[in-house]
């Protein structure tokens, strides 16, 4: 199990995992309340089978049943690794599904669940998980995930050229499919200006610990009910870049569109998401 945790970036020991995912016993009264809540959810005519199955798996701490109801890959916020399949989810389950998430599911009422049309079902206002036949999104971050994410952010920051440090946090890392470029998107939450995002570009075999060949600043924009995200970047010399991590046609590769200052040269660079710690070595 420890090997798998290291494989997708979770350096969490079994003892630490137990501390992060367990707390003091709830007591008999709370246990009975949980059972009553789950019984009402399972017997409800209002809730679909998918919601009932998820609630039952979490109440029973059944990691494999839960894993079988997830749509993969399950995205975790960068630089945490995405969960790619059932076996990874079984191992990752006690990290993600901690007492806080379990409490929301096992003590909530039928009325706490909401049907949001094409977005599917969610609980407690959408802060914890979303279900559309299967679990397709878990916005909730457990304490163990928060700690691991912060560790990875620190590791990323220390590996950057000194000019790129100072309050920036990684958002995404991309590798050109045929041009040899590496792109890195960071965000500085402390910036009050519109341009709180940054795109750094390294050409070819340039060491990623060195200063990038170009740095652009920009912002993130979301549109429509589907919340389609697009990043817009510009540099001091007038060059620009546009990137959307959510292509409207999922059969198409992701692209970064680069324009020279005079707009005479426009390059559409196909890219794939990678992990900084995998490629910087």
Image: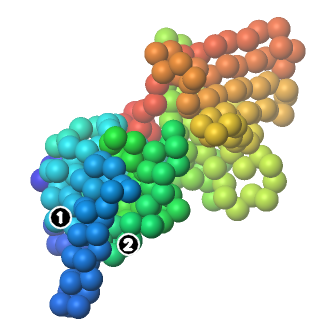
Badge 2: residue crowd in 10 Å (few <14, some 14–19, many ≥20):
many
Q: Is residue 230 visible?
A: yes
The secondary structure type at the circle numbered 1 is loop
Camera sees residue 176: no
In the picture of the structure, the residue carrying the numbered disc 1 is: 61
Q: Secondary structure at mark 2?
A: loop
Q: Residue at x 51, y 39 (%)?
A: 118
Colour style of the rendered protein structure: rainbow
In the rendered image, residue 256, in percent from the top left (x then y), is placed at 62, 22
Q: Quadrant of the C terminus?
A: top left
Q: Are marks 2 and 1 in contact (CB under 8 Å)?
A: no
The image shows residue 47 at horizontal and vertical percentages of 36, 55
Left or right of 251: which side holds 236? Answer: right
Relative placement, left or right, of 86 versus 259 is left
Q: Which residue is mark 2?
A: 108
| Quarter of the view holding residue 234 | top right
Q: Residues within 10 Å of mark 1 (few under 14, many from 20)?
A: some
Which of these two is toward me, 23 or 131?
131
Label 2 vs 1, first from the N-terminus: 1
Residue drawn 46% across the image and 16% down it: 251
Q: Is residue 20 above or below residue 241?
A: below
Q: Residue at x 81, y 54 (%)?
A: 193
Q: Is residue 191 above or below residue 232?
A: below
Query: For residue 18, which quarter of the picture?
Result: bottom left
156 versus 86 height, above or below: below
Q: CA distance from mark 2 to mark 1?
A: 16 Å
């Amino acid at each position: 199990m420890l090997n798998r945790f290291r494989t997708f970036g979770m350096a969490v020991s079994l003892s630490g995992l137990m501390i992060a995912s367990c707390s003091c016993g709830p007591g008999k009264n709370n246990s009975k309340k949980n059972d009553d809540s789950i019984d009402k959810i399972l017997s409800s005519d209002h809730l679909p089978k998918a919601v009932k199955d998820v609630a039952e798996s979490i109440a029973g701490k059944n990691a494999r049943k839960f894993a079988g109801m997830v749509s993969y890959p399950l995205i975790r916020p960068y630089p945490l690794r995405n969960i790619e399949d059932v076996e990874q989810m079984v191992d990752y389950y006690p990290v993600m599904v901690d007492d806080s998430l379990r409490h929301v599911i096992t003590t909530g009422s039928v009325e706490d669940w909401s049907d949001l049309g094409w977005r599917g079902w969610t609980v407690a206002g959408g802060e914890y998980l979303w279900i559309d036949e299967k679990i397709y999104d878990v916005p909730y971050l457990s304490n163990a995930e928060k700690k691991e994410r912060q560790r990875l952010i620190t590791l990323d920051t220390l590996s950057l050229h000194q000019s790129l440090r100072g309050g920036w946090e990684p958002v995404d890392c991309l590798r050109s499919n045929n041009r040899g470029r590496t792109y890195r998107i960071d965000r500085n939450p402390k910036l009050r200006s519109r341009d709180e995002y940054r795109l750094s570009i390294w050409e070819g075999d340039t060491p990623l610990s060195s200063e990038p060949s170009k740095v652009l600043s920009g912002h993130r924009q979301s549109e429509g009910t589907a919340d389609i995200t697009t990043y817009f970047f510009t540099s001091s010399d007038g060059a620009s870049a546009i990137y959307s991590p959510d292509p409207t046609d999922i059969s198409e590769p992701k692209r970064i569109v680069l324009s020279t200052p005079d707009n005479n040269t426009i390059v559409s660079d196909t890219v794939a998401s990678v992990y900084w710690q995998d490629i910087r070595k």
